[in-house]
Image (spheres, grey):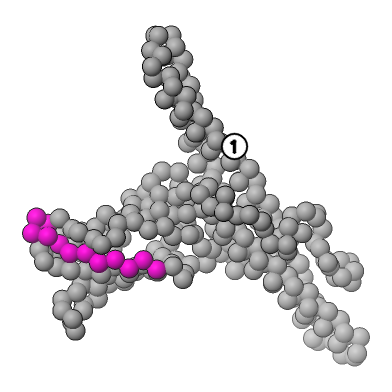
Amino acid sequence: QPERLDEVYAALRRGLQSYLQVHQLELESLGQQIRENKRNGRLGSLYELDKQVKAIERFMRREFHLSKVEELYDAYCIQRRLRDGASKMVAAFNSASGSRARESLSEANKGYKECTEHMCSLESEFESQMGEFHVKMKGLAGFARLCAGDQYEVLMRYGRQRWRLRGRVEVSNKQVWDSEDYIFLPLVTELLSIKVTELKSLANHVVVGSVSCEMLDLFCPLPQTLAVDINDLGTVKLNLEVTWSPFDKDDQISSSSTVSKRLLSNQSPPDTPSMREQVF
């Protein structure tokens, strides 16, 4: 889905740049504290500050991650242009006649399919570079809607990922949930779907509401607090805290797909028949 990937790439790139800027500012602040402590002779705190500096510097060295995302997107754009060209060729040869046209049509269809497969592979690899969303359950807010003894079930679906949790409202208005946090892996084409159900009895469950949430604004260096309107009137809200960790998955990525490796190692599209090279 090229248009969607454009939006995701813009949000991810903006988020990575902000993430690096925030850590750069923190690094400068710690450097200032170290210089002041050295001047004032407070050497005891220098060790802890130095540990923080080294930890941040390790994060700053992850700047290559942004370059990797940009290279993947560039490779994706190349395949998109090739695919658009193949689509035009298919339309042109469809309107022609003769055995030569049929052969060319078959070749153009093959090229279109190959480009589509490359794009799907690159979309999948792009997702592997998007980090993780750490979601914390902060509870429901319902004003007079929530009463002591009420029990609720919250189901969050994000692609094939599911987080189902149940909770109840205590007499003190405190909420107790059987699960408090979950990690979602960001996806290119999916929205986060949230459904809240009130559990009244074994055979009588009432759906309070369901809603879909866009995740693009969550590529942010600081934790985000969300208050999601569950029903149309907004009388029931679900409070979540989402923290984006862009680098958590890097160590798990051992190797890229062979298709993407070839795409990133060559300036020109790989395995392109000479006829299509001339046309494109």
Is residue 20 in sight in this rendering?
Answer: yes
Nearer to the camera, 199 or 250: 250
Is 224 on the left or on the right of 250, as rendered? left
Nearer to the camera, 231 or 172: 172
Is 117 on the left or on the right of 7, as rendered? right
Decide: is 90 above or below 121: below
Three-letter code for the amino acid on which mark 1 is drawn: Arg
The residue positioned 51% from the left and 36% from the top of the image is 21
The residue positioned 53% from the left and 38% from the top of the image is 59
Number of marks in the rendered image: 1
Percent across and percent down for residue 78 are 73, 61
Which range is magenta?
162-173
Decide: is 105 above or below 83: below
Percent across and percent down for residue 85 are 77, 70
Choose top left, top right, bottom left or bottom right for residue 169: bottom left
Read off the residue under disc 1. Answer: 61
The residue positioned 20% from the left and 72% from the top of the image is 198
The residue positioned 18% from the left and 68% from the top of the image is 151
Q: Residue lying furthest left in this view?
A: 171
* SS at mark 1 in the image: helix
Q: Decide whether the magenta segment is chiefly helix, strand or loop.
A: strand
Percent across and percent down for residue 81 are 73, 65
